[in-house]
């Protein structure tokens, strides 16, 4: 699925559609160049899931992972940029997170291919211009295909 965002409001709209479809145990792999909008999309997603404005949502580049909670949902926002291989990823708890019920959102997921399993929602973000972004959403298994289909329905909204 392709989605074009001409501004941050469009990115927020995509995040709200994802939030309506996403749940515990889902894995979202974010890919894109530095400054593409991975953290921005994650911030809007976490807010749409119900984490309030009093909680700062920042890039986990140096902390490697930030944890958020809303109701019964734990959200783990991880960043693989500074990791070199699967052993380092295991060292931060990635295997446990994948086996658990948290929603896992991973920036720079393409740095260690194959580490996130076979069923995930891959989102590639590319710059179009200063404010615009092109999002390519790809489901890699049955759960992520269902998630993507539900998100697409929410993104389209009710018929006019």
Image: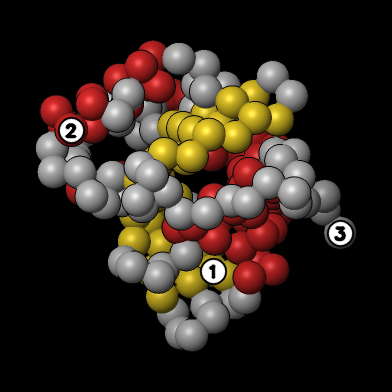
Quadrant assignment for the C terminus: bottom right
What is the x, y in percent for residue 15?
63, 51
The Cα–Cα distance between marks 2 and 1, rounded to whole angstroms, is 34 Å
Which residue is drawn at the image coordinates 82% and 50% (left, top)? 158
Q: Which of marks 3 and 2 is in front?
A: 2
Q: Is residue 59 left or right of residue 55?
A: left
Above or below — where is 55 with respect to 91? below
Q: In this view, does 134 lie to the left or right of 159?
A: left
The Cα–Cα distance between marks 3 and 2, rounded to whole angstroms, is 50 Å
Residue 153 visible in image? no
Q: Which of marks 2 and 1 is nearer the N terminus?
A: 1
What is the x, y in percent for residue 156?
71, 53
Q: Earlier in the sequence, mark 3 or mark 1?
A: 1
Q: For residue 4, which quarter of the picture?
A: bottom right
In the orientation shown, which residue stands out farthest toward the right?
160
Q: Which of marks 3 and 2 is nearer the N terminus?
A: 2
Residue that numbered label 1 is attached to = 4
Task: Looking at the picture, tell me which residue is in the foreground, 145 or 40.
Answer: 40
Residue that numbered label 2 is attached to = 88
What is the x, y in percent for residue 139?
41, 38
Label 2 crowd (10 A; few <14 / some 14-19 / many >=20): few
Residue that numbered label 3 is attached to = 160
Q: Nearer the viewer, mark 3 or mark 1?
A: 1
Label 1 crowd (10 A; few <14 / some 14-19 / many >=20): some
SS class, disc 3: loop
What is the x, y in percent for residue 24?
57, 22
Above or below — where is 62 with respect to 97? below
The Cα–Cα distance between marks 3 and 1, rounded to whole angstroms, is 21 Å
The label number, if any, that marks residue 111 in the structure image: none
Which residue is drawn at the image coordinates 13% and 43% (left, top)? 84
């Amino acid at each position: 699925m392709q989605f074009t965002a001409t501004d941050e409001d469009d990115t927020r709209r995509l995040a709200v559609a994802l939030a309506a479809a996403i749940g515990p145990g889902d894995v979202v792999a974010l890919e894109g160049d530095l400054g593409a909008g991975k953290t921005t999309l994650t911030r809007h997603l976490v807010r749409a899931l119900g984490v309030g404005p009093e909680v700062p949502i920042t890039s986990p580049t140096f902390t490697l992972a930030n944890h958020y909670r809303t109701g019964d949902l734990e959200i783990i926002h991880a960043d693989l940029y500074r990791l070199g291989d699967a052993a380092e990823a295991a060292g931060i708890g990635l295997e446990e997170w994948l086996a658990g019920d948290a929603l896992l959102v991973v920036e720079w997921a393409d740095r260690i291919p194959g580490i996130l399993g076979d069923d995930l929602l891959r989102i590639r973000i590319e710059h179009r211009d200063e404010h615009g972004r092109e999002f390519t959403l790809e489901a890699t298994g049955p759960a992520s295909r269902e998630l993507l289909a539900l998100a697409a329905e929410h993104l389209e909204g009710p018929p006019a």
